[in-house]
Image (cartoon, helix red, strand yellow):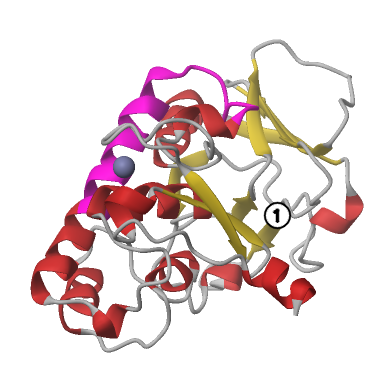
Amino acid sequence: MQGLAERVESALVGATLTGVEALQFSALKTVVPAADAAVGHKVESVGRRGKYLLIDFLEGPRVVLHLSQGGRVDLEETPKRTRPKGAVVRLRFDGGPDVLVKEFGTERKAAWWVLAPGDLGPLDGLGPEPFSEEFASLIRTGDDKRRVHTMLRDQRTVAGIGRGHTDDILHLAQLSPYATLSSLSADERERLLTAVHEILEDALVGERKRTGGLPTKLSDRFVVHGRAGHPCPRCGDDLRRVSYESHEVAYCPTCQTGGKVLADRRLSRLIR
Ligand SMILES: [Zn+2]
């Protein structure tokens, strides 16, 4: 998301919004200000907060886009009239490319907001950024009883870490997907914090190399996420998967759970 925000910003700063096409009506989450309230205003900056892309307009409202898992942003250099499958919204600009937000898959979670100045909208209650001091001290001293995997994915706890990166973070930190923060030693907490930073930095480097929006195939950019059955890049053993909270979590038993294969709770409930 950070790389995407940087790309969109360099393409759009100074461009004037000329039109808004809501292509999937349920995706617009605000009624007031109107969807086209920013038309006629120039883009002042484009930023990111958590998984949200923020477009700020000079003396105008803020447009917030949430891409969810299968979302992507296309910058259209020549104006198009098409309405591709999964199209969510198209923002038309004078002095910059049009922005088309699309979403793949069936989740239909992409959403956007038009916010009056000072209205935080969906950003209200969002946790600290992963590189902040606040997050570092939460990891070093927090006594959260939840699983680290659950915690890192909770946007109110820390903003902008998805489940794919969470799998990779725990693998790099050599921690079990079932480990709780309160049970970690000081060493393990440092390893976790370092892993969060390294995985997110690597992801940003990868993202900056791309020119389009987010790639269609997300699994290509993960180390262990979505790669169960493939060899662990550290030890070569087979990566495993376990389901909980309706997520598939990939991990390496040798590197992360002392060789123990985690029970699939969904499955064991069926057997019982
Ligand atoms: Zn391994």
Ligand 1 closer than 8 Å to the CB at disc 1? no
Ligand 1 shown in quarter = top left
Determine whether, in the image, residue 225 is placed left or right of residue 109: left
Q: Amino acid at mark 1?
A: Trp
**What secondary structure do most residues of the magenta stretch adopt?**
helix
The magenta span reads 195-217
> Is residue 201 located in the magenta-colored stretch of the structure?
yes
Quadrant the C terminus occupies: bottom right
Q: For numbered disc 1, what is the local secondary structure?
A: strand
Determine whether, in the image, residue 255 is placed left or right of residue 43: left
Q: Position of residue 45 (x, y in %)?
A: 43, 43
Residue at (31, 29) in percent of width and height: 205
Residue at (20, 61) in percent of width and height: 193
> Is residue 118 located in the magenta-colored stretch of the structure?
no
Mark 1 = which residue? 112
Residue 114 or residue 254, whichever sits in front: 254
Question: How would you rate the neighbour count of disc 1 (Cα within 10 Å): few for under 14, some for 14-19, many for 20 or more?
Answer: many
Q: Position of residue 53 (x, y in %)?
A: 53, 48
